[in-house]
Image: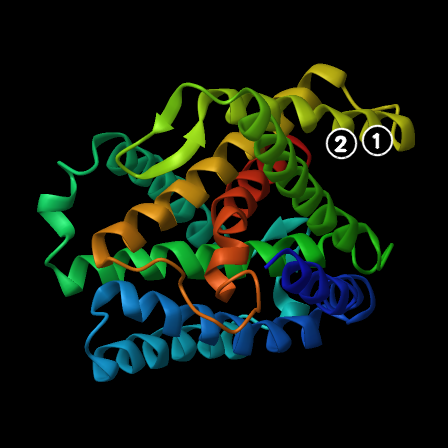
């Protein structure tokens, strides 16, 4: 299993980094759609693991929304006088509020599951609220200051990924060596409070890097945003675990050997990206 995970990372990581840094935003927006189509198909199994028609209906619905966004809000009209297009800003804001609601659902699971577990409509809506703001946030960050510095927005996207990777890595090692107190046993029995603390501590390495390369930033704000993004990523992971547990599914898919599905790799990002993007728009633009 470990060998498979390493091999998958070795071929996947260069593709991800290459797309983030070297694809123009207008192409990046279209390349993302097949990735999110796979994620939508996997979410469809949360809605009804036994009905392929339901899964494909959800996939087509999400795909049409993403295609419509690319057509009706093209990258070249995304920013006007330093202001983000209102449709994109509204979607990111809705995404932020969804993750607040999702956190409440996670904390109250399995009791909260009695409300939505048997509702295809609610689980479909939750899937759209998870995937679409993440898609919009990726394009928004990638497009920031693209006319001045084509790598600036890409660096922001990569920064969020670094925070998530640091939090995941720190949580893994701290949880294995120190973990005693369960974080959310009803949602994910293997996650611990010690793991969460280790993950948050590990993100301080990202803060050090940011302050080294951009010392003009306010340290307190950088630490606060990093920690908030890391906590959001943890609840993105827990949220997917909650929906998988409700559907009695171990992995969202099998497309990534050793890792599971696309959602298993981007679950933390689905929360971290909208939260970080909203904060960045509020405090830095």
- Name the residue that disc number 1 marks: 209
Instruction: Tell me: residue 151, above or below residue 173.
Output: below
Residue at x 33%, y 60% (from the top left corner): 127
Badge 2: how crowded within 10 Å, few (<14), some, or many (20+)?
many
Left or right: 72 as drawn, with respect to 32: left
Residue at x 62%, y 61% (from the top left corner): 139
Residue in front for this viewpoint, 182 or 100: 182
Residue 200 position, x and y percent, is: 60, 25
Could you say whether the residue bearing mark 2 is in a helix, strand or loop?
Answer: helix
Q: Quadrant of the N terminus?
A: bottom right
Q: Quadrant of the C terminus?
A: top right
- In space, the residues marked 1 and 2 are separated at their CA atoms by 5 Å
Badge 1: how crowded within 10 Å, few (<14), some, or many (20+)?
few
The total of numbered circles placed on residues is: 2
Q: Quadrant of residue 61?
A: bottom left
Left or right: 10 as drawn, with respect to 190: right
- Name the residue that disc number 2 marks: 206
Instruction: Tell me: residue 253, above or below residue 103.
Output: below
Residue 230 position, x and y percent, is: 57, 33
Residue 173 position, x and y percent, is: 62, 31
Left or right: 37 as drawn, with respect to 118: right
Residue at x 67%, y 21% (from the top left corner): 223
Could you say whether the residue bearing mark 1 is in a helix, strand or loop?
Answer: helix
Residue 98 position, x and y percent, is: 34, 44
- Report the residue that reaches farthest toward the top: 220
Left or right: 38 as drawn, with respect to 201: left
Residue in front for this viewpoint, 221 or 208: 208
Residue at x 55%, y 60% (from the top left corner): 259
Q: Quadrant of residue 128?
A: bottom left
Q: Residue 75, which numbered label?
A: none
Instruction: Tell me: residue 126, above or below residue 220.
Output: below
């Amino acid at each position: 299993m470990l060998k498979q995970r390493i091999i998958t990372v070795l071929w996947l990581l260069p593709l991800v980094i290459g797309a983030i840094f070297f694809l123009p935003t207008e192409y990046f927006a279209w390349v993302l759609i097949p990735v999110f189509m796979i994620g939508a198909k996997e979410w469809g199994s949360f809605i009804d693991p036994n009905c392929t028609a339901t899964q494909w209906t959800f996939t087509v619905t999400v795909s049409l929304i993403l295609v419509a966004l690319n057509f009706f809000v093209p990258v070249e009209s995304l920013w006007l006088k330093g202001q983000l297009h209102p449709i994109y800003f509204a979607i990111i804001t809705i995404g932020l509020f969804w993750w607040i609601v999702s956190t409440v659902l996670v904390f109250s699971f399995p009791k909260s599951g009695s409300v939505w577990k048997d509702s295809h409509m609610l689980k479909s809506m939750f899937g759209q609220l998870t995937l679409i703001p993440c898609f919009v946030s990726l394009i928004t960050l990638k497009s920031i200051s693209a006319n001045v510095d084509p790598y600036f927005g890409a660096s922001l996207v990569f920064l969020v990924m670094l925070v998530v990777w640091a939090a995941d890595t720190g949580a893994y090692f701290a949880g294995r060596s120190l973990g005693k107190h369960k974080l959310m046993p009803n949602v994910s029995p293997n996650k611990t409070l010690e793991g969460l603390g280790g993950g948050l501590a590990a993100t301080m390495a990202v803060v050090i890097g940011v302050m080294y390369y951009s010392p003009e930033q306010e340290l307190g704000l950088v630490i606060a945003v990093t920690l908030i993004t890391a906590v959001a990523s943890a609840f993105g992971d827990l949220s997917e675990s909650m929906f998988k547990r409700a559907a009695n599914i171990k992995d969202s898919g099998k497309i990534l050997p050793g890792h599971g599905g696309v959602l298993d790799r981007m679950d933390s990002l689905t929360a971290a990206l909208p939260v970080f993007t909203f904060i960045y728009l509020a405090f830095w633009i």
